[in-house]
Amino acid sequence: MTLRFDAAGEGVDTRAYGVKGLSVTGSGQLTQEATVSAGDTARFDVAFTPPAGESLLVVALRGRFGGGERVTTVRSFAVGAAADGAAR
């Protein structure tokens, strides 16, 4: 996965984890107390094992951006096929 930072930040922690049976290999910690500049990109290989059916890969990011304001953002990505058979 690739993350792009729109603003400079400090103390940036990024973690990947699974929901609905998806299991992330390892700790899932992608960054810890990192410092980033506006426009930086960071690439990560996130290994996971999905269950049968649909599950979610979740990425949570928190840090101080925009002059020290603490920001937390969470995004989720569907993995596998939903109960209706639609591929995600």
Image (cartoon, rainbow, N blue to C red):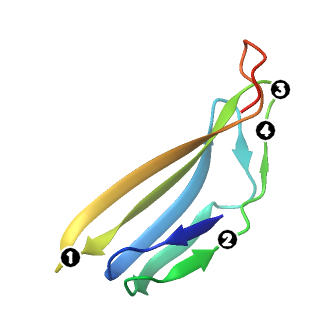
Would you call the spot at circle 3 few (<14 residues within 10 Å), some (14-19), or many (20 or more)? few
Classify mark 4: helix, strand or loop.
loop
1 or 3: mark nearer the eye: 1
The quadrant where residue 28 appears:
bottom right
Chain-order first, disc 4 or disc 1 = 4
- Asked if 30 appears above or below 85 in the picture, the reply is below
Kind of residue at badge 1: Gly
Q: Quadrant of the N terminus?
A: bottom right
Q: In this figure, which residue is indicated by the disc labeled 2? A: 44
CA distance for labels 4 and 2: 18 Å
Q: In this figure, which residue is indicated by the disc labeled 3? A: 52
Residue ID at (27%, 62%)? 71
Q: In this figure, which residue is indicated by the disc labeled 1? A: 66
Which mark is on residue 50?
Answer: 4
Chain-order first, disc 4 or disc 2 = 2
Classify mark 3: helix, strand or loop.
loop
Q: Quadrant of the C terminus?
A: top right
